[in-house]
Amino acid sequence: MFTDEELEGLRRFPEIGREELFRFFTLAPADVAFIDPGRGRGPADRLGLAVALCSLPWLGFAPDDVASAPQAALVRLAERLEADPDVIRATGDGRRAKTRTDHLRRVAQYLGWRPAGALELKELDEFLLARAMEHDSPTLLFRLACEYLISAKVIRPGPVTVVERVAHAREVSRLETFDRLANEFTDERRAGLDGLLVTDPEIGMTRLRWLGKVPVEASPTAVKAEISKLEFLRGMDAHALDLSVLPAERRRFLATMGRRLTAQALTRREPERRYPILLTLVAQSATEVLDEVVQLFDQAVSSRESKAGYKMRDALAERAKSGEGRQELLNDLLDIIFDVGIGDDDIGGLIRGERMGWPRLRQAREQAAPALPRDHGHLAVLNGSYGYLRQFTPQVLDAVPFAGGTAATELLEAVEILRELNATGARKVPDQAPTGFVPARWRGYLDQAAKTGSTSAYRHYWELCTLLALRDGLRTGDVFVPGSRRYSDDPAAYLLTPGKWADQRVEFCRLVGKPADAAKGLAEVEDELHTALGELETTLAAGDGPVRLDDEGDLVVSPLSAEDIPAEAVALKAELTEMLPFAPIVSLLIEMDKRTGFLECFTHAGGKQSRSPELKRNLIAVLLAHSTNLGLTRMADACGISYDILAWTAEWYVREETLRAANLALIGYHQKLPLTAVFGSGTLSSSDGQRFPTRGKSVTARALSRYFASEGLSTYTHVTDQHTTYGTKVIVATKREAHYVLDEILGNATDIPITEHATDTHGVTLVNFGLFDLLGLQLSLRIRDLGKITLYRTGPKQQVETHFPLTGPLLTRRCNLDLITAHWDDLLRLAGSLKFGHATASLLVGKLSASGRQNALAAALKEYGALRRTIYAARYLSDPGYRRKISRQLNKGESLHALKRDLLYAHEGTVRARHLEQQTEQAWCLTLTTNAVVTWTTEYYGLAVEQMRAAGRHIDAEVLAHISPAHSENINFFGAIEVDIEGELAQLGPTGYRPLRVRDTLF
């Protein structure tokens, strides 16, 4: 787990941060009285006892070498005790072991701590076993063990003892896992699991590998391939497995192992380890494959619908062109009719004669097109894809069970009839088949087919309407799929159970500052609304500002003028750029790892403890292969490390979990840099999408002619006001970004206390407005056409307009406060479920946003969101400074996007990974490298500013705030890539940094 050097480091004092210094090394009067009772203790003795007193709650133990305690801690304690901080170092390490032991005994007695005896170690073993059932990382378990001992006030034994306990817990957890699942391992089940590891002649590979192959396009072949997997897994009863006896984290870990290990490696593992891995893999696969089938069905149907839409628009354009002659004829006809100089008796002759003539009339009549249906022929064009859809839709309906509420009763009846028609081969739709779910714009097709007696046409149109309604029902949640995670039933199913919510309600309300009582909560909201409306009333009363009313009483919002960057900031950035050293991107990563240790976060997926000396070199090569888009093959050629080594490293070490951890290490270091606080407080963040073209087929790629020549995808990133990126997610480019705004904020594992989040119009939904406030957060948007959105009031129109004569008429709708009141506790429970990680925000936001008015919870949340949006809009319009602040934050995200485009230079920035997991890992590699560049630049900016100030130069912090560290002028992304860690570290100066350049020189 740890090298001898690392074990020795665990026995010594670590570096101390400012917060830890003040928290642990502050002596209360009682502490001083304990340390200095007034007799018998010299300065060195008192200071040594004070160090032990402060170290025990901080570290859980007192290091033997007291003299090596952090200098800042010694100075702080010495000042409090009125002693010389060097008195300890003057005695060297001369404190006798007996003295140190006596100090620790006295301190433990004073603080109420216990030594780690047999009982304490037994309790530690029980704690570690419970944690090892959730996490298999030995380093994480070691840290959790240390935290547990501190919380239990037990003195930490030597690190070797803790390491041995961790190893024991991991081994016992493996046996415990097998024992908990033992009832599942019948002879038949074991044979089935072992069969996954044997090559199946029918498919030419092992079933394990076959299950791991994910589709890259939504085609009939791909849909049927996933259905085959679903049927195979059901044949193993995988869908009926209940593995709740294992913690969710344990199940996730075992399934991940099953995906990464080869069939040969699993075969070599003993049965006690092999069978739990395979069982959890097939159980998780049953749910994932079911979701995949439904998603591919949605995507394939939607793709054909979109293509039909394009064809319809082209047909309408051609229809318009062909009708130009008829339009000219109509114009001439109207000219004749409206000419008062032409008598009624002469009009017919002119039309049929010299002015127009029979040839033009006959030609116009021949060109007459039939009247268009209400949808302009969209469904008729889609009918051309009926044969294509029939290649897979019968199999989907047969394999996937659908259910729903009362709103979907007729639709589900139609689905059942369609199943029966498919099974029997019958062509005629029964006369009693329901059509109530068919939209009005398509009813004409069914009526026309019934009128003409065309059984085939009626079947086609009725089936198409059923499939499209089924897809829409799955999206809104009116239709759900039993056994699915993504397409489960009512959104309430994702929430905390009423019992668990009752236990957590008080804690949640305390955390977010919301009252549990609906009346009190809404009273506070109404007070906020009236205050905001009063501010807007004052702004509108001025009459001549950027926000004003026109002569008709409509709201006019003039765009903000471009923010002027001070000339001093432009000049200062140029100076700093000239002072910063040049560094290849490889050298930069090596240097940042030296100071942050971010590469230590890349742990082996299988829990392997030993790390080869070349691992860091290989990791850097893999990170650069992905973040520059070179790929592993070209990186192997560029750096001299074989492709096999790079591929193995990427497979076992580089995954989303470890990339996130490494990113957090960089962000944590960046937060502590002196210059970081100048950029922002760290409490404001923003999110936006960045689009990348793709090559090859992928289920995440979509055609979007505005951005891509062919197809592409989006990465949705979350950025702090300190220029670091703390979240990255790959999403389909055509999906609403608003669904993903909350994901990374709620999943933010950093110490960044995000309280306000900015986004643009794409992040706007009423659901988001409501949820942000219920979570104690502020959603701040740069909304396009803000003056045209619907604003809500809480009272009668006349009353509101009396209080706010200018603003009142803008509030055109009244909020349904009764609906919000009736569902207040459910709204809090919804927010609590997200806050405590019980549900994924994007999944719930998507379902709630798509839900109709029949979903009372969604309707209440949208009403509350409309009220919060009105409050925000009034404040936003009243404060130009606030509007500029939001715009400035969104611009920080744009500057990071530009840096990412510079980094992802190979293959013209085209993403070639075809699977979502691979695309996600590449996106995180790009984010990690971007943050490394930002951190490196921020640190060297700080060194340059410090040097300028030391030379007597005055540099204003407000000027520095306009300088972005998201720049790459001093970093070389190109050229030869040689990962020589020792050689690069040797080039750093005695301070551990590269020397700053003298201005006006190139090197």
Image (cartoon, rainbow, N blue to C red):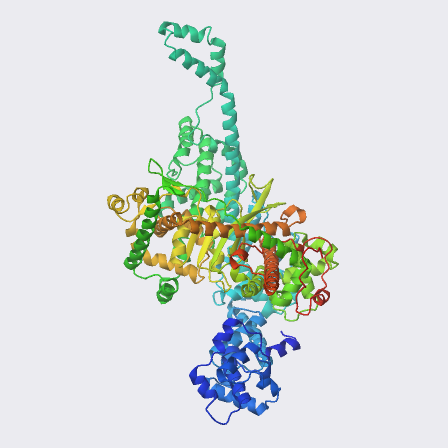
Residue ranking furthest to the front: 952
Please give the count of numbered marks on the rendered protein.
Answer: 0
Q: Quadrant of the C terminus?
A: bottom right
Residue ranking furthest to the bottom: 40
Decide if residue 783 is on the left or right side of residue 595.
left
Which of 763 and 701 lies nearest the eye of the viewer?
763
Q: Quadrant of the N terminus?
A: bottom right
Which of 336 and 324 lies nearest the eye of the viewer?
336
Decide if residue 158 is on the left or right side of residue 779.
right
For the point 53% across and 66% down, the residue is 250
Whether 334 is drawn above or below 3: the answer is: above
Which of 585 and 27 lies nearest the eye of the viewer?
27
Quarter of the view holding residue 341: top left
Residue 165, position as x, y percentages in the image: 56, 78
Quarter of the view holding residue 513: bottom left
Residue 698, position as x, y percentages in the image: 59, 47
Whether 765 is drawn above or below 41: the answer is: above
Residue 247, position as x, y percentages in the image: 49, 67
Residue 508, position as x, y percentages in the image: 38, 64
Which of 697 and 47 lies nearest the eye of the viewer?
47
Quarter of the view holding residue 280: bottom right
Query: Can the viewer see residue 517 in this picture?
Result: yes
